[in-house]
Each structure stands twice: as C-alpha cells, then as structure tokens.
Amino acid sequence: MAFKHFLIFICLLIISSCAEVGTISGGPKDEIPPRIAKSTLQSGTTNFNENNVEITFDEFIQLNKPNENIILVPSHARIESQLIKKTLRINFSESLQKNTTYTLYLNAAVKDVTEGNDSLMQFTFSTGPKLDSLKFHARIKDAFTNQLKPKVTVGLYDSLNAEKPIYFGQTDQNGTANLNALKEGTYYCKVFEDKNKDLLIQKDEPQDWLFDSVFVGPESNDSLSFSISIPRQVDKIKNAKIIPPGLIGVHIPKDVILNEIKINGAERSSNEYWNVKNDSLHISLGNIPENEIQFILNSDTFNLRRMEKNKMAKLTPKLISNEEEFSTSSSFEISDLIQEIDSSKLDVIELPDSSKLAFKISFEKNKLTIMPTDGKVRNYIVTFKEGAISGKTGKKSNATKVEVNIKEDREFGSLNVKLNKSFKTGILQLMDKEKVALEHLLKSDDSIVNFKRINPGQYTFRIIEDSNGNGQWDPIDPKKQSKAESIIYFSTPVKVRANWEVETALELN
C-alpha cells in the first residue's frame, strides 16, 4: 500500500511540474521588411521583352493597395498583380515600347504578414540594348533642426504643377537619395515625407520644392540640398473654453482683427478682453447667471457649458514670476476681471523678521501688482485675507499666503555676443537646450548684443533668417513659392555664471 501511495505522489509531482505557469517571450520585434529571394527581373536588365515579372520573397507577404503602389515609369502599360503564396506576379497589360528605359516601383506595396514592415523597391530595365544612365543626387535635412532626414521621397516632375513624379526615390539613413537611369531632360524637383504612401504631396506633409527647373544631363552630377518643413496651415479661431470662475479663453490667429465679441447676446467692450499671448485671448464672463454660454467672436459661434462647481469656484491669486531688473514688485493673476482691491485685507510681511512693509498696489484686467515701498526688500510674504479681491462675476478671493523671493542681480549672469558682419538681420536666440531663453531682433548696425539677467547654466545660440521681418520662423509656402527660412545653429556651448559677464563671438565657418 505504501508503494502505491509513493507512485501516486510521483505522478502528482510530474503533473505539477508540467503545469508550471510561465511567460512566453516573443523575442525582439521584427522590423525587417520582406526581402527578395528570387526574381525573373533584375535591376539593370536590357533587351527585356516579357509581359510579366515574378518576384518571390523570403516570407509570406500581403499586398498594400497594389493598384496605387505598384508603379511603372513611364506608365506605358497598365499593371495587374496577383499574389500566390510568397510570389508576386506582375502582368503588363500592353506591350512595352521598344528601346525605352523603365523603372518598376514597389512603393510600400509589399508588407510582411506579422508586423506590416514595408520598403521602397525598384527595378530599372530597358526594352533596348542600353539603359538611360543619367543620375540625380539630393540631400535632405529638416529645415528647423538641420537634422538629416531618412525615408523622404525625392521626385522629378515634368512640370511644377504636376501631381505625380516621373521618377522618384527615397533617402537613406544619411538623408541622401540617388535617382539612377534617368533620361536627359528638364525637370522640377519636389521632396516630401510621403506618410500615406500615395506619391502625392499633402499640405500637412514636410516638404521642399525646387521652384526653378533643373536640367539633368551628362555633366549634372552635383548633389542638390533641400530643407523640408510643413507649410503653415490656415489658422482659425478655436479651442474656446471656460476658465472658472470668470473667464473664457480662446485661441485666435495673431492677425485677426476683433470686430465683435458677444456672450449670451451681450456685447463685450474692449476693457473686458485682453491678449494673454500673441495667439490667445481672455474674455470676461461677467455676472451672467446662465450655465449655457453662447460665445460669438467675429463670425464664429461657440456653445459652452459652465459646470455648477466651476460657477461656484472662488478666486485664487496666482503668483507670476518676475525677473525684471531693479524690481521688487510681485504680480498676481486671477481667473476673473478685477473690479476692486480692498487694501485693508492685504498684508506684506518681510522675511525673516516678520515686520510689516508699506506697499502700493495697482491692477489691470485680471492682474494685480504689489510694490513694497522699501526698494531693498527681497523676500516677503503677501497675505490675502478673505475677500481682498472682487471680480466681475461677483466672486471674491479666498484667504491665502504667498511667499515671494526676488532674485538679486548678483544671482544672474550676462552675455555680450559679438556678431560677424555677415549677420545683418534675423532673430538671435539664446537656447537653453530646446527652449528659447531670450531672443533679440537683429538690426543691420548690431555688432554686439547684450543678454542680461540670465540664469546660470550652459547655453547655445541659433539665428533665424527672418527674411520677411515678421519676427518668427516661416516654413515653406508653395503657393507663394517661398522656401523655409534658414536657421544657423551654433553648437559650441557657452557657460553663464552668477555675477559674471561673459563675452563670446558668433562666427560663420
């Protein structure tokens, strides 16, 4: 009996081991597109006289819009495709012309079944004894970052307004594209990130155009440079929202002229709205009781709903950072149009001795400024008692204390930037990594630019061309046939120390 129990124990142990739960790893993600195992057509073939091509891949594939993405250039024959297991069969419905060089493109037409990886494949062949042998070289970078761009389509067109290219290729990891087997002639070149693989340039795709024609001939071996950018889209009034308790915020294009602003049929006067930034506007809601808000700005209408809890919200003063030179004042914002300040409900306490400070106040729109009369004070607490600020909604501010610390001049550094005479105009920007710390609009007589009150740290520079003088970087505009404004990056960093004045020079290599 004991032996029987022992056997049962062993069997249970084996079953338990076999049933152990574990995690099955699929290994690294497959990022390699299908590869050609064999083909009846090789790139460079001459005297081609077949009416079909068979291409076998190293894995099972799926076709992606073959009628659009399998392309013959020149398009002298209609293409029909058929997939049999791993083999793609391409039939030419009409006879190809004699003594003509063709390129057959598989523009993301073939994907693997598992991950959907694709690529651009091309076969150049001739129905005659020789191939067209001319070449076109291009190098593509991002217009704003100057980084080289892979997987950008480079197309040659027979006219500037043509939608699809006669020849095309794609940049490699170094941003370089080489178009081969071209016929001598005059072309227009456009480059673009073909995100939807349709060989058409969409307005929201990064792009660059060569607005003048280029001749491709035996002597034209130079590489042309392109800088891609997304054309600026037509900006609209949008993103209207309630900022509780008493404001509406809305995005407006900077060039919009404000003709009419109404809230629930009541027009707002100019002292009831203000620009927060170049593209942002705040409007006072006032003391309207309704929760359903109809907001009209020029010809645009927005229907907004005010939640009851937001309607009941109190006003909370928020400190705005202040780094103005020689200023000990502090500024606060509330989400309402300020109507009245009760100075008896405000105290300014110096730190660390807790003595009361005399102060002056001023306010405009939704901004309150407190100015201690002692110009030497650096650290203090502003105490707002209940009801210190009254807003247009009828709401009053809640009780709060805010500590203010004013930096002294010696806590900042400064930079004197000497400019090369090549820099006549543009926008000089002091860069803190990817963020613009400070900027200066260059004038033709600028030889030294001084940046003051800079936080200690390491900075670089860039200069935006700003050829139209609008104070901003502009991308390509195909309609105006204007290219993206160039940006010069100075990658050598300069270190700013507290209470130090540093000199540096910007030179073009």
Image: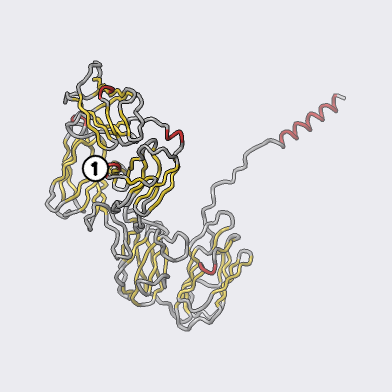
Residue 355, given in percent of the width and then of the height, sits at 23, 16
Residue 489, given in percent of the width and then of the height, sits at 26, 50
Q: Give the camera-side residue of 47 and 76.
A: 76
Against 29, is 165 above or below?
A: below
Q: Give the camera-side residue of 268 and 503.
A: 268
Against 66, is 294 above or below?
A: above
Residue 43 in view (yes/no): no
Q: In which quarter of the image is residue 62?
A: bottom right
Q: Give the camera-side residue of 145 and 252.
A: 252
Q: Give the camera-side residue of 298 and 408.
A: 298
Against 387, is 434 above or below?
A: below
How many numbered discs, if any?
1
Q: Residue at x 33, y 40 (%)?
A: 284
Q: Residue at x 29, y 47 (%)?
A: 278
State the residue position of label 1.
Answer: 438
Q: Which amino acid does label 1 sit on?
A: Leu
Residue 92, given in percent of the width and then of the height, sits at 55, 77
Residue 72, given in percent of the width and then of the height, sits at 49, 73
